[in-house]
Image (cartoon, grey):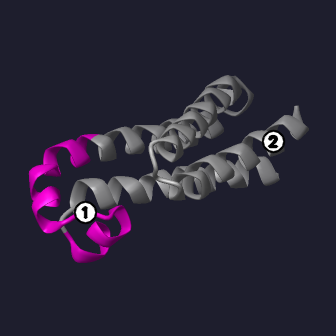
Amino acid sequence: MVGPVLVVLVALIHAYFLVLEMFRWEAPRTRKVFGATPEFAAESKVMAANQGLYNGFLAAGLLYGLVLGVAGGQMVIFLLLCVIVAGLYAAFCGIRAALFAQTVPATLALIALGLNF
């Protein structure tokens, strides 16, 4: 039961990224989270919304995979691996917070799911 709960947590994190990147990108708190200036936020609004959309697809795919049950297991594992790689890449590019916001929760979910197979 721990694995699916952690998968939901990963999905919620990415749904939150969707909200930040699509709807709150220029808000002061969001700019602070991403270290963006008002000018950069204004110039990158469309790009951020696109990133948010992709995060929403990750969240939806993870939840849909859980709803499918065993039939969705491979999809959930694939999407968790995508989240792990994205977090590692962001960390490699200097965004260390991605390790804790993306890589760690997705890795824990993957491990917990592996214990159930």
- Residue beneath disc 2: 111
Residue at 46 percent of width and 49 percent of height: 94
Whether the magenta-drawn stretch holds residue 113 is answered as: no
Residue 92 in the figure: left or right of residue 31: right
Q: In the current view of this chain or complex, which residue is farthest to the bottom?
A: 28
In the picture, residue 28 is in which quadrant?
bottom left
Could you say which is closer to the camera, residue 107 or residue 69?
Answer: 107
- Residue beneath disc 1: 36
Q: The disc labelled 2 sits on which kind of residue?
A: Ile
Highlighted range, magenta: 27-50
Q: Counting other residues with Cα less than 10 Å from the Cα at mark 2, is it few (<14), some (14-19), or many (20 or more)? A: some
Whole-percent x and y of residue 54? Answer: 36, 38
Whole-percent x and y of residue 106? Answer: 65, 46
Looking at the image, is mark 2 or mark 1 nearer the viewer?
1
Whole-percent x and y of residue 114? Answer: 84, 35
Residue at 42 percent of width and 60 percent of height: 16
Q: How many marks?
A: 2
In the picture, residue 110 is in which quadrant?
top right
Residue 9 in the figure: left or right of residue 98: right
Label 2 – label 1 distance at C-alpha: 34 Å
Could you say which is closer to the camera, residue 96 or residue 28?
Answer: 96
Label 1 element class: loop
Q: The disc labelled 1 sits on which kind of residue?
A: Ala
Whole-percent x and y of residue 89? Answer: 51, 37
Rendered view: 4 above or below 54: below
Rendered view: 49 above or below 35: above
Label 2 element class: helix
**Dots 2, 1 in contact, CB < 8 A:** no
